Image (tube, rainbow, N blue to C red):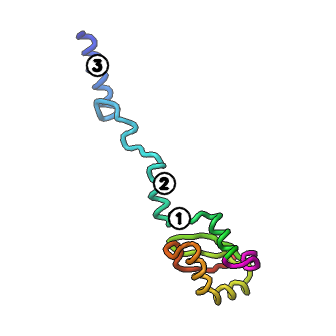
Amino acid sequence: MKKNFAQDAIRRKIRRELWGCDDVLDLNENVHLVSEFIDAIVAQAGLLDGIEEESLRAAWKDLAGEYIAKCSDPLSLKRGLLTIRVTQPAMRFHLEQMRGSLLLKIQQSLGKDKIQTLRFTMG
């Protein structure tokens, strides 16, 4: 018994000198999984607006019409701002003129709380 006690004392002394503590630290103590933070990151990025990309694209095609949908594409929806990518400057001008009525149609279809404003960008 005394031999084991002496060996344990030597081991504790060596650990203290090498690691600065008596026992090995718990390696999982301050480790967090990425999954614990994903909801917060997604919410902070404004991506929890509740509209799936495919349903947004389908709604845009129905609301804007076939021709306008060919020349434009919903790019992103963040914090109520729907960004529409437009391929031609003339079409962008046309959509800027229709902004109010187009926004009203989108809000009636997808919900006023989800989309508050539109932005058109060239791309």
Q: Position of residue 94 (x, y in %)?
A: 69, 87
Q: Nearer the viewer, residue 3 or 24?
A: 24
Q: Which mark is residue 50?
A: 1
Which x, y percent locates residue 28?
40, 38
Q: Is residue 59 above or below residue 92?
A: above
Q: How many marks?
A: 3
Dominant SS of magenta comes to helix
Compared to residue 41, the image places residue 70 above or below, namely: below
- On the rendered image, what quadrant is the N terminus found in? top left
Residue 58 at x, y = what percent? 67, 68
Q: Where's the C terminus, which quadrant?
A: bottom right
Q: Residue at x 68, y 79 (%)?
A: 64
Residue sitting at x 66%, y 85%: 95
Give amino acid for label 1. Answer: Gly
Q: Which residues are magenta?
A: 63-70
Real-space CA distance between mark 2 and mark 3, rounded to the nearest whole angstrom? 44 Å
User: In the figure, is residue 41 to the left or right of 102?
Assistant: left
Q: Which residue is mark 2?
A: 38
Label 2–label 1 contact, CB within 8 A = no
Foreground: disc 2 or disc 1: 1
Q: Quadrant of residue 4?
A: top left
- Which of label 1 and label 3 is nearer to you? 1
Q: Nearer the viewer, residue 60 or 30?
A: 60
Q: CA distance from mark 1 to mark 3?
A: 60 Å
Is 74 a magenta residue? no
2 or 3: tag closer to the N-terminus: 3
What's the amino acid at mark 3?
Asp
Residue hosting label 3: 8
Cα separation between marks 2 and 1: 16 Å
